[in-house]
Image (cartoon, grey):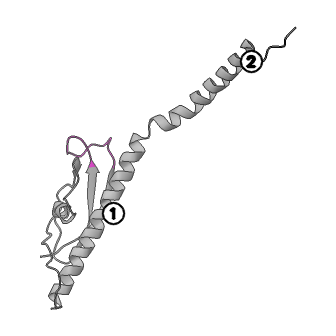
Amino acid sequence: MKQQSGFTLIELIAVIVILGIIAAVAVPRFVDLSAAAEEAAVEGVAGSLASASSLNYAASVAADAGLANAPTPTNVTDCNEVGPLLEGGLPANYFIPSAAVGDGATVQCTVGFDDNGAVDANKPTATFTAYGVQ
């Protein structure tokens, strides 16, 4: 009599049950990462806006000091005027609510993500510092 090799039906069912339990525990952790991704993206855009505003202000200080070859600063009198400082402008579906920024002043501005382009309490927002340049 020849001995057969392979798995029994019980062993196969046990493996399928174990894989099902692992999938039931692990899949929900990875399925809904879109909210975390939106938050991280908004934080990244806010960091870029803060850097762009800082560089623009530094260009203004350099120009006011009369430094040769100083870059030309862009006027910023409102928070939403910081968006165009980014190369390519503010990404699609992001918005910056209007808030006045005085010359040489700093203001905490908000940037948010929303398909409608309006403030939505269910969508992530982040703050950045805008420097006024006139």
* In the displayed structure image, the side of residue 22 where residue 54 appears, left or right: left
Residue type at mark 1: give it. Gly
Residue type at numbered disc 2: Phe
Question: What segment is highlighted magenta in the picture?
Answer: 113-124
Q: Determine if the magenta segment contains residue 57.
A: no
8 relative position to 93: left or right: right
Label 1 and label 2: CA atoms lie apart by 56 Å
One can see residue 105 in this view: no
Residue 77, above or below 8: below
Q: Position of residue 80 (x, y in %)?
A: 17, 60
Residue 86: image quadrant is bottom left
The C terminus: image quadrant: bottom left
Q: Position of residue 19 (x, y in %)?
A: 63, 26
At x 17%, y 62%, the residue is: 84
Q: Circle 1 is placed at which residue position?
A: 47
**Residue 61, relative to residue 87: is it above or below?**
below
- Tell whether 21 sits left or right of 45: right
Q: Nearer the viewer, mark 1 or mark 2?
A: 2
Image quadrant where residue 108 sits: bottom left
Q: Which SS class for mark 1?
A: helix
- Which residue is denoted by mark 2 in the rendering? 7
Quadrant assignment, res 69: bottom left
Query: Which residue extends farthest front?
Result: 1
